[in-house]
Image (cartoon, rainbow, N blue to C red):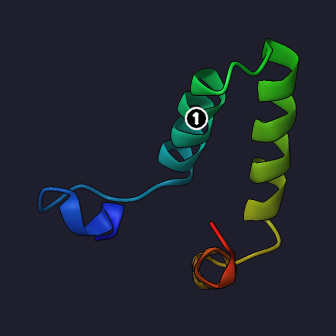
Amino acid sequence: MLVRDTLPQGDNWSNNACLGYAILGAKLLGYSEEQTKELVRAIYSEFDWKTVEEARTEYEKSPY
């Protein structure tokens, strides 16, 4: 099941939500503040270069 399929009607996906998930994951993994900043910056940069569909495809073809 996809995260977007579990959202109540009217909730929208956003770049900020994506970054929030990344921050939460980084905290669970014990990333330092600097490591988390680097991760967020790297993801944020990709928003300018990849579409949502390209990002979805990248995830779906990954081993994760």
Q: Looking at the picture, how far across and down is residue 44, in whole percent?
A: 76, 49
Q: Looking at the picture, how far across and down is residue 30, in whole percent?
A: 69, 18
Q: Looking at the picture, how far across and down is residue 21, in whole percent?
A: 52, 40
Q: Residue at x 79, y 14 (%)?
A: 33
| Placement of 30 over or under 61, stated as above or below | above
Quadrant of the image for the C terminus? bottom right
Amino acid carrying mark 1 in the image: Gly
SS under mark 1? helix
Image side of residue 34 versus residue 30, left or right: right
Q: Residue at x 61, y 40 (%)?
A: 22
| Placement of 28 over or under 14, stated as above or below | above
Quadrant of the image for the N terminus? bottom left
Q: Label 1, on which residue?
A: 25
Quick one: which residue is furthest to the top in this view?
A: 33
Q: Residue at x 24, y 69 (%)?
A: 5
Q: Residue at x 76, y 51 (%)?
A: 43
The residue nearer to you, when weighing 60 against 40, is 60
In the picture, residue 55 is in which quadrant?
Answer: bottom right
In the picture, residue 49 is in which quadrant?
Answer: bottom right
The residue nearer to you, when weighing 55 against 14, is 55
Quick one: which residue is furthest to the front in this view?
A: 63
Q: Looking at the picture, how far across and down is residue 46, in whole percent?
A: 80, 62
